[in-house]
Image: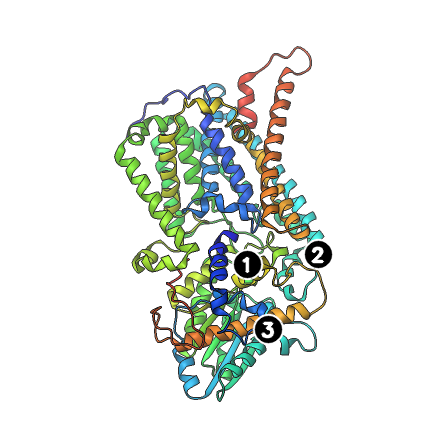
Amino acid sequence: MIWRLLPLLVLLLLAAPAKSQSVAAHTAECRVAEQQVENNFALQQVRRAIAAKQLSILVIGAGSSLLPGANGAKNAYPARFQHALSEKLPGVEVKLATDVKAKRSAAEMVAAMPPAIAAAKPALVVWQTGTVDALQATDPDQFSQALDKGINIARSAGADVVFINQQYSPRTESMIALGTYAENMRWVAVQQEVPLFDRFSIMKLWADLGTFDLDSATKKLDMAERVHDCLGRLLADLVIEAANSDDRLPSDRSGVKPSEPHAEGIR
Amino acid sequence: MKEKPSMAPIPTERDLRLDLFRGIALWLIFLDHIPSNAVSWITIRNYGFSDATEIFVFISGYTAAFVYGRAMQTHGFLVATARVLKRAWQIYVAHVFLFAIYLAEIAYVVHSFDNPLYTEEMGVLDFLKEPDVTILQALLLKFKPVNMDVLPLYIVLLLWFSPILWLLLRAPSMALVASAVLYALMWTFDWNIPAYPSGTWAFNPFAWQLLFVFGAWCALGGAQRLNRWLNSRVVIGLAFAYLLFAFSIAMTWYFPRLGAFVPHFVGEAIYPIDKTNLDILRILHFLSLAVIVVWLVPQNWSALKSRWCWPAIVCGQHSLGIFCLGVFLSFAGHFVFTEVSNRVLTHVIVSLSGIVIMVGVAALISWYRVIERQGPGPRPPTNKKSFAEGNA
């Protein structure tokens, strides 16, 4: 995995001084992973919703979209994402609904999708999945089919989709085989032209650079909260960038965040 | 095609190249099994479609045919079958042993690790709540923790090996065709063995048997038949071209920018590259590697007997023990990364020490073989039998 990140690390070192101005709003710890937030696909519905000054979002997810505690919902990434979007899109009303329950596989979330979408009428469905399927060792083909089905349900209800993949979790790395599920997710995202928020690589980079000590055994929430805050901000970057890009051509990049052109990332 | 009733006699001298490359494959599997290991960038899976598993399965098929084929010719079907099944039993015991170590590791994590960020991931420990079910499913080979899929595959392949060997000794081409038909049927009807708690086996035996049987076929005279092709410039050229193609595709995994140069229809055609069902692209990649290796490394290459090749060869000669050791060492290595230090230097030290330990233990097993052969009392040394036992 480190090998995959080496070129990025080099890029980061080269790009860091040039980048620092454009991301003044970010805290330093989030910023290091900014290169990981790549997107090739446009979010047309979100673009329209922003133009209409009303953006409604539905976050569908499992346990890693939650934080424990009384303030869990307020500090978990969905709420931080909403907060970051409101800051970056002055004048736009950002509404957020969540359908988040622990231990749900992709297929279970698909089953719960139609009523949730009917209630929230979102322009964007943010879908976090992949961990529970890896834990339960679901048939990878069925996992991919569930992803396709979910995308179709959201799209036919007039919503764009963004995927969030698994967390990087160093302690359990030798016990959960994420690989196939992460790859299938990436592949479905490319085929269906859905932006993928690569949470795994972002957190891996944080761990490699020592931004967050993801190995630490603690009951305290402070690091988890900062991680979720950063994830929410970076996710907002991705969504705004995708809403601002007209099509998947890398040359067009008239966004909030200046970014280098990049190619279609098939993996 | 009509075969002679008993095909070319099985060569008596063991091809050291097999041991060499199986030893290297065992090292690579060890390196790949340590999650996030910086050193694993050197392993072949990063530069093409196939990985060390293909090498391991092919060579295991080759050596199984080499050892048990001779047993079947001299002692008959029954004795050879008995030996194959004994081997399968040994592998089963080894697998259960590894599972016990895995349980210890995972139970340690339950007690030592707690982090609100990873509530969901800790669900991996849920199975400890009903150990009766889990352990039973593990004994049935249905519950298989991460990286413990290869031995169950090997067991299943050996369970049905002796009828295949019987056929291979009589009508080798037919046996190979039958294997390919099974592979095709598997793709058509989605055959696989169910797993627990859900899903199917990560290495589909209906698919991977093709490589195992192909290895066995090569051992029983197939390699000689292929000789004409293996020395053809056209084949070598094609193999190089395919490796180059796979290499360029692999580079787009690390440098997504390069993906722009991959035409859309190529992506559509090749992805996803299925490891569970042994994608044809993976087979072709392995075959290309094999063609190039056979071309570069002749059987009588003098270095095979030198001390430089010895460490890998000795590991390859005791593959079962060294494979299990490698799985254990990869658990241990990951443990060091999370508990002690996660710097790149640690990765290098852990990887190198792991390989040194594997070589040391392999040498120790060899030494035990020698003293056991000398044995107590008047029993004469039985050289031939020793091949049949540990090394298949």
Quarter of the image for residue B152 reads: top right
Residue in the image at 56% along x and 21% along y:
B386
Within 10 Å of disc 2 (Cα), the crowding (few <14, some 14-19, many 20+) is some
Residue depicted at x 70% and y 61%: B114
Q: Is residue B332 above or below residue B261?
A: above
Q: Position of residue B381 (x, y in %)?
A: 59, 14
| Marks 1 and 3 close (CB-CB < 8 Å) | no
Residue A64 vertical placement versus B107 (above, below): below
**Of helix, strand and loop, which one carries label 3?**
helix
Q: Amino acid at mark 1?
A: Ala
The quarter of the rendered structure image containing the N terminus of chain B is top left
- Is B132 in front, or is A142? A142
* Residue at mark 3: A229
Looking at the image, is B11 positioned above or below residue A140?
above
Task: Residue under label 2, please give it.
Answer: B110
Protein chain holding label 2: B
Q: Rounded to the nearest whole Å, what is the CA distance between mark 3 and mark 2? A: 27 Å
The residue singled out by tag 1 in the image is A134
